[in-house]
């Protein structure tokens, strides 16, 4: 395992935290917006989230299987962390496995 592969794990953590955190914000804007959602802004953010994720995955694929696996591992860990923080922020919901 080389240094380049190890750099993709923190990249996956940062990208995953931003991606899933903005997905959480995006979902709340759709459900809880007081005057209704602003569709243009939400669509732009959603497309930006997907474009950045696709670009990061494409760049890691070009580097090989190791960086792709490291990026994917970082994304999955970030997803779990965002879900855990969301559950802790909302104690009124039941804890599901």
Image (cartoon, grey):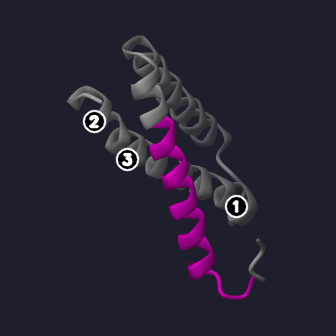
Sequence-wise, the earlier of marks 3 and 2 is 2
Residue at 54% x, 62% y is 82
Q: Residue 69 vs residue 88: left or right?
A: left
* Callout 2: SS: helix
Pointer 3: what residue?
Answer: 14
Marker disc for residue 23: none
Residue 85 on the magenta span: yes
Query: In the image, is residue 92 part of the stretch drawn in magenta?
Result: yes
Q: Residues within 10 Å of mark 3 (few under 14, many from 20)?
A: some
The crowd level at tag 2 (other Cα within 10 Å; few <14, some 14-19, many 20+) is: few
The C terminus appears in which quarter of the rendering? bottom right
The answer to whether residue 5 is above or below residue 84 is above
* Residue range of the region highlighted in magenta in the rendering: 71-93
Q: Tell me which numbered mark, 1 or 3, is placed earlier along the sequence.
A: 3
Prevailing secondary structure class for the magenta stretch in the rendered image: helix
Q: Badge 2 is on which residue?
A: 7
> In terms of image quadrants, where is residue 45?
top right
Residue on which the image places disc 1: 35
* Residue 22 percent across, percent down from the top left: 53, 51
Residue 36, given in percent of the width and then of the height, sits at 72, 56
Q: Residue furthest bottom?
A: 92
Residue at 55%, 48% (x, y): give it.
76
- Separation of disc 1 and disc 3 at Cα? 32 Å
Q: Of the residues tagged 1 and 3, which is closer to the observer?
A: 3
- Mark 1 residue element: loop
Residues 62 and 32: in front is 62
């Amino acid at each position: 395992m080389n240094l380049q592969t190890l750099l993709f794990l923190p990249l996956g953590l940062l990208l995953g935290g931003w991606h899933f955190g903005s997905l959480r914000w995006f979902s709340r804007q759709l459900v809880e917006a007081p005057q209704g959602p602003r569709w243009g802004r939400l669509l732009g953010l959603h497309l930006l989230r997907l474009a950045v994720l696709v670009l990061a995955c494409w760049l890691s694929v070009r580097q090989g299987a190791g960086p792709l696996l490291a990026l994917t591992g970082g994304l999955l860990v970030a997803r779990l962390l965002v879900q855990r923080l969301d559950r802790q922020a909302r104690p009124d919901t039941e804890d599901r496995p």
